[in-house]
């Protein structure tokens, strides 16, 4: 049976009996920030805490850049994707951007409580001012911050190609 890599959605929503798989250490901080009441449950779970190698983190960034999802993925998301690539496992996630990356790379994924993606998408960044388009971004974004246009200074917004 392939190794399962659990996204934070599984850590937040699944009962203890289902919490078996690999996770990245930064998820602990994310979980404590979002749902501190799950701390003891997570400590009791059969989780394999691993940090992905630099090579697979680069592979994950390249994959997310290719699909255009990089601008919407956090550092934790990229580490989870990298660990899935490294272990050759199944990613358990409700994050549509991670699911989109999985579809593009031929990686198996399972949703936690959602339906999952219906089709693969490509993304681009569009300037809200001059409408200039950037087809990929090398920098991952957090909290919807995708940078600003060098031509007019307006913020970028993600759009499906």
Image (cartoon, rainbow, N blue to C red):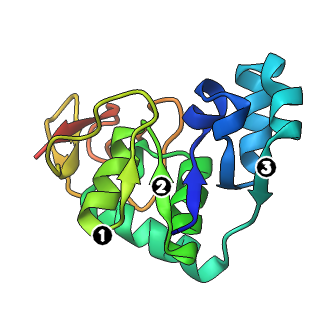
Q: Within 10 angstroms of label 2, few (less than 14), some, or many (20 or more) residues?
A: many
Which residue is found at the position 53% from the left and 37% from the top? 142
Residue 160 placement, left or right of 56 = left
Which residue is found at the position 76% from the left and 51% from the top? 47
Residue located beneath label 1 in the image: 105
Distance of label 2 from label 1 (alpha carbons): 12 Å
> Residue 75, position in %: x, y?
60, 51
Which residue is found at the position 42% from the left and 27% from the top? 113
Q: Residue furthest left?
A: 161
> Residue 117, position in %: x, y?
24, 41
Residue 130 placement, left or right of 157 = left
- Does residue 136 show up? no
Residue located beneath label 3 in the image: 46
Residue located beneath label 2 in the image: 91
Q: SS for tag 3?
A: strand
Q: Quadrant of residue 22?
A: bottom right
Q: Within 10 angstroms of label 1, few (less than 14), some, or many (20 or more) residues?
A: some
Q: SS for tag 1?
A: helix
> Residue 132, position in %: x, y?
15, 44
Mark 3 vs mark 2, foreground winner is 3
First reached walking from the N terminus: tag 1 or tag 3: 3
Of residues 52 and 66, the one nearer the viewer is 52
Q: Quadrant of residue 114?
A: top left
């Amino acid at each position: 049976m392939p190794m399962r890599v659990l996204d934070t959605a599984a850590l937040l929503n699944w009962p203890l009996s289902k919490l078996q798989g690999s996770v990245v250490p930064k998820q602990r901080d994310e979980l404590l920030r979002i749902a501190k009441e799950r701390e003891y449950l997570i400590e009791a779970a059969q989780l394999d805490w691993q940090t992905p190698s630099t090579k697979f983190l680069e592979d994950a960034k390249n994959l997310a850049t290719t699909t255009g999802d990089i601008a919407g993925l956090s550092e934790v998301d990229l580490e989870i994707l990298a660990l899935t690539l490294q272990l050759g496992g199944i990613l358990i996630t409700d994050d549509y951007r991670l699911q989109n990356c999985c579809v593009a790379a031929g990686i198996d994924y399972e949703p936690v409580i959602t339906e999952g993606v219906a089709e693969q998408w490509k993304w681009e960044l569009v300037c809200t001012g001059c409408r200039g388009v950037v087809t990929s971004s090398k920098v991952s974004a957090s909290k919807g911050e995708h940078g600003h246009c060098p031509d007019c200074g307006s913020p970028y917004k993600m759009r499906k190609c």
